[in-house]
Amino acid sequence: MKSSRTSPQITIALVGQANVGKSVIFNFLTGMHQHIGNWPGKTVEKAKGTLFFDGYTIDVIDLPGIYSLATFSIEELITRQFILEQKPDFIIQVVDATHLERNLLLTLQLLELEVPMVLALNQADLLPKHGITLDYLKLSSILNIPVVPTEAIYGKGIDDVLKKGLTLITAPQRATLLNYGQEVEQEISTLTAALTPLNLPYPNRWLAIKLLEKDKEVKEIINHEAIRQETQNAISRLEKIHGHGCEIIIAAERCQAVYHVTTKVTTISSGQKPTLSDKIDNVICNKFFGYPILIGITAFLLCFVFIVGNMTSTFLESFFPLIHSCYYHWLGNHFLTHLGWAGIESLLGILTLVIPYIAPFYFMLYLLENSGYLSRAAFLTDNLMHKLGIHGKAFVPLLLGYGCNVNGCLACRIMETYRERLITAVLATSVPCSAVTIIILGLVGKYMGLWWVLGLYFGNFLFVLALGKLLNKTLPGKSVELIMVMPNYHFPHLKTALIQTWFKAKEFFVLAGPIIIIVGIIIQALYLSGILNVMISFLKPITVNWLGLPETVGILLIFGILRKELILILLATLLGNTDFSNVLSLPQMLTLTVVSMLYIPCISTMVAFQKEFGWKKMLVLSAGKIAFALLIGGIIAKIMIL
Amino acid sequence: MNENEISLTHLTHLKRNETAEIISVLGGTNANKRLSDLGLIHGTKVKLLRKAPYKGPIEIQFRSTRLILGYGLASKIQVKKSL
């Protein structure tokens, strides 16, 4: 009998525009057999999974959601490079059947890459609701590629997509390529002929089209003087005839061709009623109701995360003393076991204090994202974000920052340019995360009242606005305008959201875990060797003289770098009980809270920030924040004493 | 219909539910390319769905696509409105 090792192994890739149900199909195909990493050298997620089907071992790559194959964003570049260089055995383009025309624009470009392709016509079940009938067999015969209707959320049609794809391997099918019209086609064939002798590992027709589209990457690949000259001549001939830039001529031809295909295969019943999405949007995006709803949803999300997180965290922490006593009971009480315990304590800290907040936060966020609400939030907040040099899409990373700065930092990848990513990341690491919220509620909330808490949040919001304005003024470059497709509302798919949440939590654990554990051990070693005490007295001018805090707070602030909630936890440990009013006066509480809120992103956030933007920017950010926090903390201390 | 009844304006000047035809996009090559990738080119008929207040973004519909555009970009898109 053949073992599964000798079964033929193939690689396939999922491609598609955003919000077409690609991740639902990916999760259906690979289930829990997937892992998420980054593309080499890039900070774009790469999800890969394996499935066994029909005697094949199939590696499935989930390529990022894109709109075209021009290299405007990193995502598009990656998709293109992957298909051209890794040459998957076939690709599946997931298409939103209710937005066929826009999706076909990408299809035509994918076909030019000359890889076998299957079209998964997703959400075909929603067509009657939109008053559209679609002849998918006709579409299949026009493009000469397999077209399969699917209903991803019920798993319908996905097997069929794979079967059709596998037949393409044994019996290749030549897809119909788009004809760009006589004048453009003439230039394409001249350039194709000139490119053929170069024997480049890419389809020549595709290279020719990209040259006419003035594609920078392709220009660099070819780097051939005669061809550059020939391209230039062709472009000026075409621009002279049409009176538009050559890239626009080609895009217009593509739109035209897609329009023809769409009208041939679809009929839209006249007198369309406003859809449910339209009706909901009249309320959700309304200039009077929209903002209260946005604030309400955000507040609900944060409360949900805080309550669920707090409950889970308290439950998990109840095992702490047991593990602690078992550990020392079995291993004894000496220097090495103390070090070991510091490592375990950090590990348990991630599991009991961080993951319980991250997981529900991501779950809610995926529900909001899949439902389509986040795009509405981007619409509503775009105006405000513009003043900070970013645009509406930055709402997501900033919202994430309130749950956990690390996630906020990582989510900046959705922004298009480096400048926007940097501004968004700096702002996302400046909002109070759930750990800071614990400190705010535990000190200021408990002893000074809710109004002070709201005041702190509002003050921080103003600080973020001012910081954004400052960055926008000082960083070189211009801000990019928002261009975003508004998806229809969907009922979110729970299972996909759960799987995505699981992988996010895992990703966080792998990214931050080892460093948190190592730093925990180092700080413990410093403490045991007495160096930490020296450092505390070294910090005395700052903690005691400038901030007016007790000397021991120095320890708290050092440990707080590891995890901010430790500030509060250690305060209780040092004190022996949780009545903080015994050691801190009200002004001291306020000072400590403000400093904790502002002084430094925690170590996990610094690691995430460093991975995205490098050491230099991370150190500048950290140093800047410490200086600012001490300045504000000192001022508050001085004012409160008056 | 007489020639004078056709008025040139910018996307941001349309009222809710008004339709117009795109004449040109003066938003630079990148923006232009991204819009054409979505199927928004000269000659496309668009309908203004809503505007966010205080020069916020606008939402338009063309064929089956609903698109949000920042105010700055939308103000650079010239359209022809038939009266």
Image (cartoon, coloured by chain):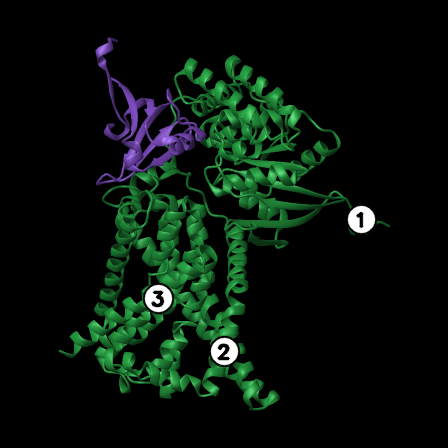
Picture quadrant where residue A329 is located: bottom right
Q: Which mark is residue A522?
A: 2
Q: Nearer the viewer, residue A104 or A446?
A: A104
Q: Is residue B6 above or below residue B47?
A: above
How packed is label 2: few (under 14 Cα within 10 Å), some, or many (20 or more)?
some
Q: Secondary structure at mark 3?
A: helix
Work out whether disc 3 and disc 2 sit on a shared chain. yes
Q: Colour of chain A?
A: green
Q: Amino acid at mark 3?
A: Ala
Q: Which mark is residue A623?
A: 3
Q: Position of residue A465 (x, y in %)?
A: 26, 55
* Residue ID at (37%, 60%): A429
Q: Position of residue A16 (x, y in %)?
A: 53, 38
Q: Amino acid at mark 2?
A: Ile
Picture quadrant where residue A578 is located: bottom left
How packed is label 3: few (under 14 Cα within 10 Å), some, or many (20 or more)?
some
